[in-house]
Amino acid sequence: MTEIPYIAAIEMAIHGEMERDDSVLYFGQNIATSENDKFLQAFGPDRVRVTPISETAEIGMAVGAALAGFRPVVELYMAEFMLVAMDQVVNEAPRFRYMTGGQVKVPLVLKAGYGFTAGWSGQHTGTIYGMFMGVPGLRVAIPSTAADAKGLMATAIRDDNPVAYFHHYLLTLEPGEVPDGEHLVPFGQAAVRREGGDVTIVALGYMVGLAMNAAERLAGEGVQAEVIDPRTLNPLDLKTILESVEKTGHLVLVDQATRHGSASAVIAADVADEGFSSLKAPIKQVTALDSTIPYSQPMEEYILPSEDKIVGAVQQVLGQAPVTA
Amino acid sequence: MTEIPYIAAIEMAIHGEMERDDSVLYFGQNIATSENDKFLQAFGPDRVRVTPISETAEIGMAVGAALAGFRPVVELYMAEFMLVAMDQVVNEAPRFRYMTGGQVKVPLVLKAGYGFTAGWSGQHTGTIYGMFMGVPGLRVAIPSTAADAKGLMATAIRDDNPVAYFHHYLLTLEPGEVPDGEHLVPFGQAAVRREGGDVTIVALGYMVGLAMNAAERLAGEGVQAEVIDPRTLNPLDLKTILESVEKTGHLVLVDQATRHGSASAVIAADVADEGFSSLKAPIKQVTALDSTIPYSQPMEEYILPSEDKIVGAVQQVLGQAPVTA
Amino acid sequence: MKQLDNDRLVWMFTQMARVREFEERVKRTFEEHPGVIRGHTHLADGAEASIVGSLATLEPQDQLMTTYRCHGYPIVLGTDTKAMMAEIYGKKTGLCGGYGGSMHLTDVERGFLGTSGIVAQGIPQATGAAYAAQIRKENQVVLCFFGDGASKQGAFSESLNVASLWKLPIVYVMENNSYNVVTRVEQEDANAAAGEPLAVKAKAFSMPGETVDGGDPVAVYETVGAAVDRARSGEGPTLVESKVYRLSAHGNIIAPPGVPLHFPEHEAIEVFGNADEYEAAKKGDPVPRFRARLVQDEVLSAEQADEIMQAARDEMQAAVDFGIESDFPEPAEATKYVYA
Amino acid sequence: MKQLDNDRLVWMFTQMARVREFEERVKRTFEEHPGVIRGHTHLADGAEASIVGSLATLEPQDQLMTTYRCHGYPIVLGTDTKAMMAEIYGKKTGLCGGYGGSMHLTDVERGFLGTSGIVAQGIPQATGAAYAAQIRKENQVVLCFFGDGASKQGAFSESLNVASLWKLPIVYVMENNSYNVVTRVEQEDANAAAGEPLAVKAKAFSMPGETVDGGDPVAVYETVGAAVDRARSGEGPTLVESKVYRLSAHGNIIAPPGVPLHFPEHEAIEVFGNADEYEAAKKGDPVPRFRARLVQDEVLSAEQADEIMQAARDEMQAAVDFGIESDFPEPAEATKYVYA
Ligand SMILES: Cc1ncc(C[n+]2csc(CCOP(=O)(O)OP(=O)(O)O)c2C)c(N)n1
Ligand SMILES: Cc1ncc(C[n+]2csc(CCOP(=O)(O)OP(=O)(O)O)c2C)c(N)n1
Ligand SMILES: [Mg+2]
Ligand SMILES: [Mg+2]
C-alpha cells in the first residue's frame, strides 16, 4: 500500500498494464509531446503518441487498432469531448462484435474526466455517464477512490469490451491508499463503503465522498446509513443494492448528473421493480437541478448536490423532515 | 379532419409553418435535390436546401442561423446520424441561451427518425431519445399518431428552444385523422389514449400502438388498462401519470429502448419517488433486451417489446401471473 | 507492383463476373423471394473494376475496411458466397450468423475487418488498423474504401491528417459514383461544384491525390498499386479517387414492413429525369468493357469468357439456393455476442 | 476596403493597447485576488494585432463568432470592459450575468453572437450565421475565428466545404499560434509537418487560402479586408491563416479547488525548454512593434502613445475595481435561463 493521488493511481494502472502487455497502446491529445514524458520514455513512440484534436479519428482509430489486435487506451481529458465522436463510442465500438457474429472483439478504454464543477461553466462540467450506461456492449466504470481508480483501470484494459472509464476531476489530487503491484477491481461488484441498517445511500463517483460525510452527520443524529458505491454502471451490481434495501427499507440515490439525465434514475427504476417489496418509503434522488452548470460559484453550488441535500433527503425518506417537492 | 399518413402530417406541419413564418428554414441531406421538390417550389432555394453529408456542419449551422434570428428545421433521417454531431445537440444548442445569460435563443428543430426495426440491423435501429431527455435546455417530442405528428411539429417550430423531434420509422405510412389548418399540440401535455382503472400503462412513441392492442386483449380478460402517451419527454407531464397511478395503483412502462438506456426508467424513477404511496405493486418496464438489434427477423423479434410481453407484465403487476425476472 | 500476366487478367475478369452476378442475384431476390431480404441493401454493380483492380494489389497479410456497400470485396478475397448470401437472407449459416446482414459483411480471416453503416466512420477505423500495421511491422498495408459523399464528413479529414502526419501504410480509395443517395456530387461538394477533381482534397493533408478511371481494372490496379507500394515502403498514405458509376439505385426502397421492397430505377432517371446519363453509363459498363478488351487482346476467347460468366451464374445460383434453404437462427441466440 | 487613415491607425493602436492591458489585468487577478477567477481562462496577449486588424474591416451590421479565447474581440467592438471583467469574476453585473464566465463572453448587440468552449464547434455555427446573412440580404459578413488546432477537427472541413459550395459571406480567420495547449503544430498537423502553410487546407474546398503575419495589424487588415470584400460581393469565403504567437501559456493551470490557480510559463519554456523561441516572440511583440511603427511614421508621438497606454491602464483598473466590488448573483437565479 502506498498513498498516492487518484490521478497517479490511474497512471500507475496504465503504466503497469503497458509493462505487462505489449498490445496496450496509449494515445490522445496533449500527452507525450516532449521527450521527458515518462510513458514515452518507457514505451516509445510506437505505443505512446500524441494525436491531433480529432476525437473522431482518435476513437475511430482505437476501434480499428482494437479490431487489428491491440488494446488502445485513449486519453480524452474531458468526457464532453467524446460528444464530437459519439458515434464511435455508442454506435461503432460496442457494435462490431455483435454485428460480425462474434468474429471480432473491440478492447479499448476511453479515459475521460467528468464533472469539473470548479467554475468550468456550461460545456466542461457535465456528468454524462448516464448517456453511456445503457449502451449494449459498452462497459462503464466510475471510480471514486484512488485504489479503485487503479483497479478499475487495470480491469478495463484487460476487458475484451470497449470501456468508458470516467474519472472525476475534483478527485484528481485526492490521495488514497493504493495496493502496490497488480490490483484488479472486478467489474460489476459494488463496494459497501459504510454499513448501516436505516437507509441505503447509493452514491456515484465523486458523490460517494459527499454521501460518506452526510452519513457521518446522520450517525450523529442516530441514523445509520449504508453507503454503496456501484463502481461500475455497466455491469451494474444490482444485487448488492437490493440486499441493502431489503435490510434498510429506504433508498436515497446521489448523482451529480441532472435528474432526468442521471444514472441514479435508472438504478432507482430497477429497485422500484425488483426491490419494491422491501421499500418502506419513496425512493429519493439527490441530483443536480435540471440546468446547465453556471460559472458563478453561488449559482453553481445551488445547482449541485450537497451534503445538506443528502441529509435532507434521508430525513425525508425516514419521515423525519417535512416533505417538500 | 383528413386522413393522411404520419409522415405526410409531419410535412404538412413544416409546410404550414414555413408559409406562416418566413424565418423558418428547412435543410438537410437528400431533400430538395430536384426542381420538382414541393418545398423548393413553394419556398425557394434560400429557405430550402440540400446539404452535404455533414451533420456537424448541418446542426452547427442550424445553431448559428438560429442565433442569427432564423428557425431552422434540420432533416436528419435517422436519429443515429445525430451521434456524429452530438456535441452540437447536447453541448451547444441547449447551452447558448444559458451561458450568455439569456442574451440569445436557439429555436431549431432536429427531425430524426428512430427505431427502424425492420431489418436495419445494428446501427440504424436505435431508440435513443433517452440520451436527449435529460439534457437541460433541449425539448424532446415523440409523436405516436399522425395528428400529434403534425401538432407537435408545429409547436416545435414555434418553440424558442432547440427541439429534438423523434418520429418512429414504423409509423411512417400509418394513416390517421389529422386536423386541417393550424393544429398545435402543447408540449408537456400527455394524452390519455384509453381510460381504465386497473393498471396504468405509460407507452412511448410507437409503443403506444402495441400498448393499445395489449389493453384490448386485457379488457377481454376483464382488466381495464389506462394507456398514457406522454407525447413529449421534456417537458414531461408527470402529473397525468401520477394521477393515473393514484387511481390504478399499478404501473407498467413500455419503451422500445434497451432497459438501461430507456426513458421509461427515468419516468419510473419519478413515480417511485412522487407516486410511491399510490403504488400497490412493483413498477414493471417492458423494454428491448440489453442488446444491439440483430438483422435476422426471429432474433430481432426476440429482443423487442411485444404485445405479449406487455400483457405479461400487466398480469405480473396485478399478481395474475408467476413472477419471473 | 507485380506485372499483370494473362492469368492474372483472367482472374480479374473472373472476379468482376462473380461480383456482378452476385449483385444481380441479390437484386433478383427481391422479386423471386419477396420478404427474404429486409432492411437496406446496397449493390456494387458498376464498381467491379474498381474493387477488383484495388484488391488485386494486396498481399495476403494486408487488410481492408469498407462501407455498407460491401458485397464485392469479400467475393474477391475468396469468402464463401454461400455464407454471404445466407447472411443477406438473415440465416444462421450466414457469414455473420445473421447478426449483421447486408451492410456488415466481415471476414476477419481474410483481412476484411468490417464495415460501418454510418457514413465515413470506417475511415478512422481503417486508419487505426493502419496504425496497428505500422507498429506491428509485418509489412502490412490497409485499404480503406468509402464513397464520394463520405469525404464531406469530418471523420474523413481528421483521419487523413493523422495518416499523413504519421506516414501510415494506408491507401484511401474514394469510390466516386457522383451520387450520395439522391444528391449529385456537384450539389454537395465544393470541388465538384468548382469543376475540380475530388482528389484535390489530398492537398489539405500534404498527401498525394490521384484520380483514376474506376471502370478500368488495369488502370485502378496501377494507380492503387503505386499507392500500395508507397505505403508499404513507409512513405505514407495516398488518396485515390476512383471514378465509377453505380448501375443500380443507391439501395432498395426504404419502407416499413408490409410494403414490398425492391430496387427503384437509378436516381439519374428517377429523380433527375436524365436517362441519357444512365444510358451512357450503361454503355461503359466495366464488365463487358473488360471482357471485350481481353477478347480483343486475345487473353481470352469469347467461349472462355462465356464459361467464366456461366460459372459465376452457377456459383451464385448455388448461393441463393443455400441461403433460401438454410434455417433461421434461434431467437434466444440474439443476446449471444453483446459482450465478449 | 477603406484606406487606413491616421485616425484609424491610432484607433487600432488604442484597441491593441486596451486588449493587452485587459489581459494583463486578468492575469494579475490570479495573484492580486486569488480565488476570484475560477475554471479556465485563456488570454489573447500576442494576438492583438490579428484581432484588431480583422475587426477593423467590419461594418456595423457584420457579425462574428470566436472560441473560448474570446476577451479581445468585444473590447474592440466597444463592449463595456467593466461588464466583461465582472463576468470573468462571476458577478451579477457581468456581461452574461455570471452564467458564462471567461470562455463565453457574448455581446449580441454588437454582433458578437457567442463562443463555444468545444474546439471548432463555433465554426459551423458561424457558418450558419453566414447562411442567415446570405438569405437576409442585408450586406452582412461574418468573421469566424478559431485556432490552428481547431483545423484538425471535422467541424472545420465540413463547414468550409458548405461555405464554399454555397458561396457564403464569411471569412475564416485561423489564428495559428503554433500550439494546441502543449502540442506543437508540427506534432499534429500534416501541412506543418511537411513544411507547408496551414492555409493550404483551403484547396480542399476550392477556396482561396492566405497566410498573413498576424503580428502586423495593417497586413491583417489588408488580407482580411480583401476577403471581407470578396465575401460581401457574393464571391464566397476565404481562409486566412494569421500567424500569431501567444505570449502567455494556453490558460491558467487546471486544478481542483484548493489549489491556487495561476498562469504557468509558456509551453515553449515549460514543456519544451526552448526559451529562445519564447524570447524571440517577445521581441516581436505586436504591441510595442506597432507603437514603434506609428511613432516612427509620425502618426503618433511617444507622449501620445504613452497617454493611450495610460488610458488603457486606467480603464482596466476601473474594470477590476468594478468586478471586485460587484455582487454575486442570487443562487436561486441559477435556473433562470435554462429554457426560453
Ligand atoms: C452519418 C450518416 N449520415 C447519413 C447517412 C445516410 N446515408 C447512408 S448511405 C448515404 C450516401 C453516402 O454516399 P457516398 O459516400 O457517396 O457512398 P455511396 O452510397 O454513393 O457508395 C447516406 C447519406 C449515414 N448512414 N450516416
Ligand atoms: C473537442 C475538444 N477537444 C479538446 C478540447 C480541449 N482543448 C481546449 S483548447 C484546446 C487547444 C486548441 O488549440 P487551438 O485550436 O490551436 O487554439 P488555441 O488555444 O491555440 O488558441 C484543446 C485541445 C476541447 N475544448 N474540445
Ligand atoms: Mg457516392
Ligand atoms: Mg493554437
Image (cartoon, coloured by chain):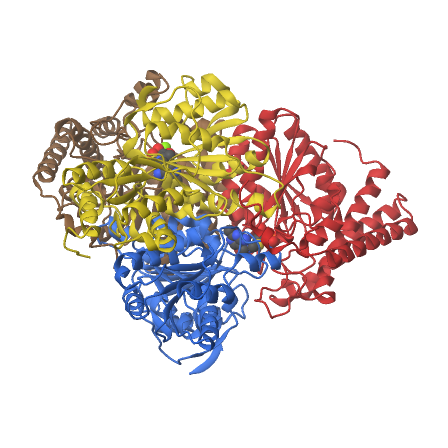
Chain colours: A blue, B yellow, C brown, D red
Q: Is residue D259 above or below residue D128?
A: below
Write down the quadrant of residue C275 in the picture.
top left
B184 relative position to D74: left or right: left
Horizontal and vertical percent position of residue D21? 77, 55
Q: In the image, A253: left or right of B310?
A: right
Q: Is residue C175 visible?
A: no
**Farthest bottom residue in view:** A1
Q: Residue at x 78, y 46 (%)?
A: D15
Q: Seen in the image, is A95 located left or right of residue C309?
A: right
Above or below, C116 against C281 in this view is below
Question: Quick check: can you spot residue B127?
Answer: yes
Nearer to us in this view, D300 or D261 = D261
Quarter of the rendering containing residue D163: top right
Relative depth, front residue between B153 and D280: B153
User: B34 or D215, which is in the foreground?
Assistant: B34
Picture quarter with ligand 3: top left
Q: Position of residue A125 (x, y in %)?
A: 52, 57
Q: Position of residue B310 (x, y in %)?
A: 21, 44
Q: In which quadrant of the rendered image does the N terminus of chain A lie? A: bottom left
